[in-house]
Structures are given as C-alpha cells and as structure tokens.
Image: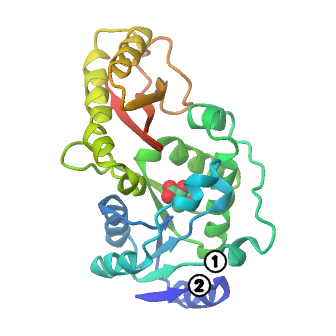
Amino acid sequence: MKFFTEKDTLQKYLATIKLANKTIGFVPTMGALHKGHLSLIEKAKEKNDVVVVSIFVNPTQFDNVEDLKKYPKTLKNDTKLLESVSCDVLFHPSVAEIYDTNIISKKFNFDGLEHQMEGKFREGHFDGVGTIVKTLFEIVKPDKAYFGQKDFQQLQIIKKMVKKNQIPVKIKGCPIFREKDGLAMSSRNVRLTEEHRKIAPFIFKTLKKVRKKFGTKSASEINEWVQNQFKKQPLLELEYFTIAEEKTLETAETKESNKNYRAFIAVFAGKIRLIDNIRLRN
Ligand code: PAF
C-alpha cells in the first residue's frame, strides 16, 4: 500500500493512474477503522482499478471539543486493516496540509437538508463535512466515492453538494454494518463504558419495532411510543427520534405511497453520542 501525507505527492501519483486510464474509488474516513469501513473499501475494490482511503480527523465538523480531542486515533492498526483488504493508497494529511492556518469551514446551502435532525443539534457540522469532502474530492478526483448509510443525512448532503457543484464523482451509499447484537458499527463504540455497551443494542431493537409499527400506526403515535421506551431506560438519553422522507429528510406527517421513509435516532449513552437509522416500508 502506498502512503502519502502530502497532497502534491499524492496528486502526482494519482495523475499516473489517470493517465493509464484507470478508475479511482475513494473512501474518506476519520480512521479508527472497523468492519463497516472495510466493507466500503471492498465495494470500492470491486468497481474500481485503484482504491484510495483517506484518514483525517476533520476538526471543522466537530461541534464538541471533547469529542474531537477524544476521537480514537489508531493509525497503526488502521494501516494493518487496510493492508488486509488490499487497499492501494492511504492518504493521511496533517491539519495544516488541509487547512494551512485557517481552520474554518466554508458555508454551504444544501437546500434545507442541513437544517433537519443532526443539523438541529450539531451547529456547523455539515459545513465542516462539506468543506472537507469537497477538498478531498478536489485532491483525489475520484470516479466513485463510498459512504455508509449510518450517516444517512451526511450521505444525502454529499449527494446534494456534488450535484450543486457539478463535481464529476458518483456517490455510492452502502448498508449499515452491525455488531452481532445489532449495534451499528461506529468508531465511537470503543469509547462506551461496559454498561453502556451492554445496553446500546436497545437502540436498534427499538428501531426494528418501529419498522413493524409503521405498517399500522401513525408517525406521531410511533414517536410517542419511542419517547416512552427511552423514559424507561435510564442509561440511554434520547436526543431525537424522527420518521422522515428519504429525499428531503423532512419529518413525515402522513404516509404517501410514492415516497420512501426512514426512522432516525440519536441517543446519548453516557457521554457518547450514537446515531442509527432504519428504512421503513409503507
Ligand atoms: O463519515 C465520516 O467519517 C466523516 O464525516 C467524513 C465523511 C470522512 C468527513 O470527515
């Protein structure tokens, strides 16, 4: 696996790949890799000649200083994992290499997607994500880029950014990877205490029950039911639960047969914030 920390040398290398008419698949990450990331890399390997992974803990997308400071950094292990799935290129720039001394995000308009769910609770988060993903796309110039559906809102926002800015890259959303007990894989899971880790699968269990209820109950009835479930669960604090339409991410008031819906949830397990979502059938 080739390893780059500077954008110039990476770009020189990738220019030779392009010149040879080879396609580039790109998987941007913040490291602390798990099986979910590896599944994105495997998908990218299937469909592209060369796979580039970036590991960059992007400071501008964190609204919580503590979360940024404590974000797990496991480069040695990440490198081993990347080699185990035959990743071709790892790009691991410093903050200065990406932002120079101006560590701020650009302002984006994602046609309202940014004001829903995460946008209500994580000030400036999607401007930070937009800034780094656009910058990385400009450096790597991939043919296809792969993102997990656990961050479904992020995925829709990146699709919107690509469309609005006419960036020539195909965005591929990939299924959520789960632990055996249903907990959605996340780099933050390693920071859960033992008791919080034990109770965390309750989140997905609840979402599965929501999927069942969606056939017969209204969105507001389900919402109330979820609120009550979490009231009985003192170790988990529900931040939001919402059933939303997939394209606009607007909260569903009524069900329309020609639209797709998802249930979205954010929960604090102690100090660790976990998100998850599930596709609903109407
Ligand atoms: O999903 C993530 O890990 C990050 O938000 C991303 C897309 C790598 C941007 O920093």
- Mark 2 = which residue? 5
Which of these two is toward me, 238 or 14? 238
Asked if residue 214 shows in the view, the reply is yes
SS label for mark 2: loop
Q: Give the amino acid at mark 1.
A: Ser
Picture quadrant of residue 257 = top left
Q: Position of residue 171 (x, y in %)?
A: 50, 56
Q: Position of residue 204 (x, y in %)?
A: 29, 35
On screen, 91 above or below 137?
below
- Mark 1 = which residue? 94
Which of these two is toward me, 133 or 62? 62
On screen, 50 above or below 243?
below
Q: Give the amino acid at mark 2.
A: Thr
Packing grade of label 1 (10 A; few <14, some 14-19, many >=20) is some
Q: Name the residue: 63% across, 77% down.
A: 94
Q: Nearer the viewer, mark 2 or mark 1?
A: 1
For the C terminus, which image quadrant? top left
The reply, left or right, for residue 103 in relation to residue 83 is right
Q: Position of residue 89 (x, y in %)?
A: 46, 82
Reading the chain from its start, which is encountered first: label 2 or label 1? 2
Separation of residues labelled 2 and 1 (CA atoms):
7 Å
CB atoms of marks 2 and 1 within 8 Å: yes
Packing grade of label 2 (10 A; few <14, some 14-19, many >=20) is some
Picture quadrant of residue 188 = bottom left
Q: Name the residue: 29% across, 42% down.
A: 195
Picture quadrant of residue 232 = top left
Q: Name the residue: 38% across, 75% down.
A: 78
SS label for mark 1: loop
